Amino acid sequence: MADTLTEEAVEYPGAKRPERVRRVDSHGVGINVVEWGRADAPVVLLAHGGFDFAGTFDVFAPLLAKEGWRVVSWDHRGHGDSEHAELYSWDADVRDALSVIRSTTDEPMPVVAHSKGGGILTQLIEAQPHRFTRFVNIDGLPAHRPRPDVADHERTRLLNSEITNWLAHRRAAAGLVRKPGTIDELARRRARMNPRLSLEWLRYLVTVGARRDDDGWRWKIDPALRFGGFGPWRGDWNLQRFGGLAAPVLGILGMEPEEMGWGTRPEDVIPYMPPGSKVVGFEDTGHFVHIEKPREVAALVLDFLA
Amino acid sequence: MVFLTHAKVRLALHELQSGLGVSLLLLHGLGERSPDVLPDWFDAWRGPIAALDFTGHGASTVPRGGGYSAEILMGDVDAALQHLGEATLFGRGLGAYIALLAAGARPDAVKGAILADGPGLAGGGSRPGSPTIAAVDPTEAGPPDPFALVEMARDLRPPDYATAFARQALHLAALERPITVCARERPEWLQAVIDEPGVEVMTLDEAIAYYTQI
């Protein structure tokens, strides 16, 4: 395999970098905001998921922009080209999202949000309903699952083990540096989290979401961030609040279970949807529905926003 | 005072009393800072005594743009434990909740957690309320960090989450009484912890006298 360390860019069919890039100060943290489409067109906001970045919309966003939308997205703090922060939390992400919205328009807008972005926007739409017209949630709909049948003492040990691993990561976080590599090496590493996405796409993502240092490419995401974790939040709390959202919801679900998804089925969430909503399941598609099926998802979204 | 590192934050650890044996680590309440002078409540403690300024408080780093959680502050305590070795924790208010989490997370290093009244004991309750985007005065830099005051006053503390940490301490610590409650305020999370078999309720004097003998 060719060493792609020195490659400047990798082409991907249909991928287009944003036309405009700007910086928003969110209470001291620099947030990278990107836009596709005409600057005077109506705004649609895109929110990426955890461990992703706005560049993961490089195929999907242009499909919306081509149909007359000003597509605005941003890198969450610690992700992509936004600043690494001292602290990360759900509330901080919600606040950063509001900073991006305020910097864009005071007019109500539709939003399209994937995974963790869907959770953040659910909270923001409930807190500030006057800012939103429609909500497309791509595989970010949590389902209430019964806890596995594990003895109490075993559950205690499992939780302690999870916390011990998290604390070990925190102890090491000050000195952590992402491992360098070639474009191919970084793409293959990411394939562990994105096993259904093509290597061609992941190689393209490296050139967008990683930086090239003297010793190789490194993902830009803050190494202090760690996948998974624990805390008091329950997914079903979010689900129970969907019915109260003022914005109609289009829920899009990937039917193939993946580690990064919730494994939610349409029947899990349809009873909770507000009036005017619908839920569509994509068969033979994983958590990254808009990346696996960008044209089909864009057509569905454009129809919902029309 | 020494400074410890927890990820990107510099934590101030105040060494208030020297001595031999297990340390007593004081954890302040929400919006407070470590005391400059040791209160006489701790006169009976024979070993060393230290006090930690949580992230965003006292002489510790005030981060940009908030992002606090009880779990992150538990990581602050873990950094202090890494420096001190074994320690008994005394927590006021917010510090009491963090002491409980740390006792569950590090049952080998925490030689008892004393949970006392103080600011921030209740947190944000057991379930989320109507969401709001907290407004913070950008001209007020702190310490204490205004984001900490807002975010840790809203921090959710479901009773079964608190008892999961209590059970870790009760099941995994080699200590007969790993958790002792002195607080008179009893938010739901704390009442649930008290209801766990093995959790003790006693006065602060009794608790200090008990743990200093270990």
Image: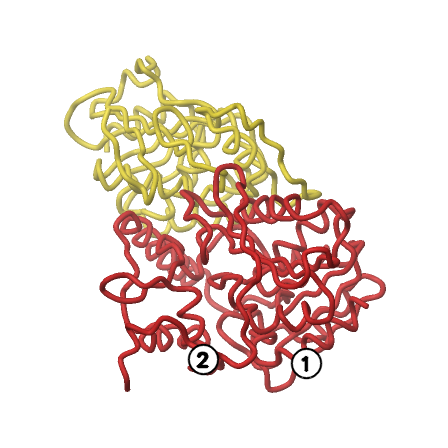
Chain colours: A red, B yellow
Subunit under mark 2? A
- For residue B80, say whether it is visible: yes
Q: Is residue B55 above or below residue A235?
A: above
| Nearer the camera: disc 2 or disc 1 | 1
Q: Position of residue A246 (x, y in %)?
A: 80, 54
* Nearer to us in this view, B41 or A117: A117
Is residue A64 rendered to the left or right of residue B147?
Answer: right
Mark 1 nearby-residue class (10 Å; few <14, some 14–19, many ≥20) = few
Mark with earlier residue (2, 1) = 2
Q: Position of residue A260 (x, y in %)?
A: 50, 70
Determine the secondary structure under disc 1: helix
Q: Which quadrant of the structure image shows residue A165?
A: bottom left
- The residue carrying mark 1 is A296
Q: Is residue B13 above or below residue A32?
A: above
- For residue B160, say whether it is visible: no
Is residue A103 rendered to the left or right of residue A194?
Answer: right
Q: Which quadrant of the structure image shows residue A43?
A: bottom right
Subunit under mark 1? A
Q: Position of residue A280 (x, y in %)?
A: 72, 77
Q: Amino acid at mark 2?
A: Pro
The dot on residue A195 is: 2
Q: Position of residue B173 (x, y in %)?
A: 31, 47
